[in-house]
Amino acid sequence: MTPAPRIRHWDLYDYEPCAEAMRRHTEARDKASADEIWLLQHPSILTLGVGADPAHIHSPCPLPVVRSNRGGQVTCHAPGQLVVYTLLDLRRLRLGVRALVERLESTVLALLAEAQTPAHRKDAMPGVYVEGKKIASIGLRVSRSRSSHGLALNVHPNLNLFRQINICGNPELEATSLRECGVEWSVDETARKLLPHLLQALYTREAHA
């Protein structure tokens, strides 16, 4: 029987110690280990995926920049953004990487439907978009069928910070947020509303059909 996932909540969690905690957890887990879902915010920082080009960061940049072991391009994290890390056994869930990305996108789309905010995917550009602007980013690391990192949903961050980067490597792409879309939820409220959609997407048989 699949053990129930452990849900962990933090307020602000500095990026580098959080990434190190994810690494240690992922390396130490075994077949019997429960999945974990971490919900948190990061202080303002830019992170570069394994193959990300630093040229997508505009100069001069006042934000700290760190290299991450996740996939994807440069990402901006800031207070007011809900970060959801999914530390999963993909073999046990019978999910591949692409399927996990689709489940995470579906989670955000379901949440935005609840908020009566029309949203959509884009081909070959993981994440969720509202009127062409990016509201949620996805970046994962998968090793030995164990996933880490996850998604970042803009609730009410300072969107000016996103002007420090080319989002998804695209200088024309803009960021948006729930607040900009007229949804006045706090990060904690957003986390409470998102979690049931995430658990349904990951752990119900219908989601895996």
Image (cartoon, helix red, strand yellow):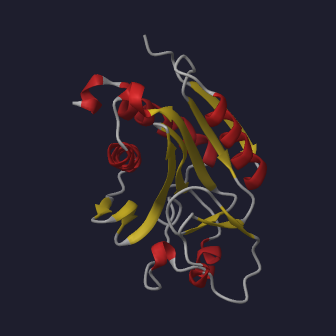
- Furthest residue to the left? 209
Quarter of the figure that contains the N terminus: top left
For residue 141, above or below residue 55: above
For residue 42, above or below residue 203: below
- Furthest residue to the bottom? 59
- Residue 39 position, x and y percent, is 62, 40
Mark count: 0
Q: Residue at x 40, y 30 (%)?
A: 91
- Furthest residue to the top? 1
- Furthest residue to the front? 144
| Residue placed most toward the observer, 49 or 117 | 49
Q: Residue at x 27, y 65 (%)?
A: 123
- Residue 132 position, x and y percent, is 35, 72
For residue 199, above or below residue 132: above
- Residue 154 position, x and y percent, is 54, 59
Q: Residue at x 50, y 71 (%)?
A: 175
Q: Is residue 84 left or right of residue 161?
A: left
| Residue placed most toward the observer, 174 or 126 | 126
Q: Is residue 99 visible?
A: yes
Quarter holding residue 92: top left
- Residue 109 position, x and y percent, is 35, 49
Quarter holding residue 126: bottom left
Q: Residue at x 63, y 63 (%)?
A: 157
Q: Is residue 182 visible?
A: no
For residue 83, above or below residue 196: below
| Residue placed most toward the observer, 36 or 156 | 36
Quarter holding residue 134: bottom left
Quarter of the figure that contains the C terminus: top left
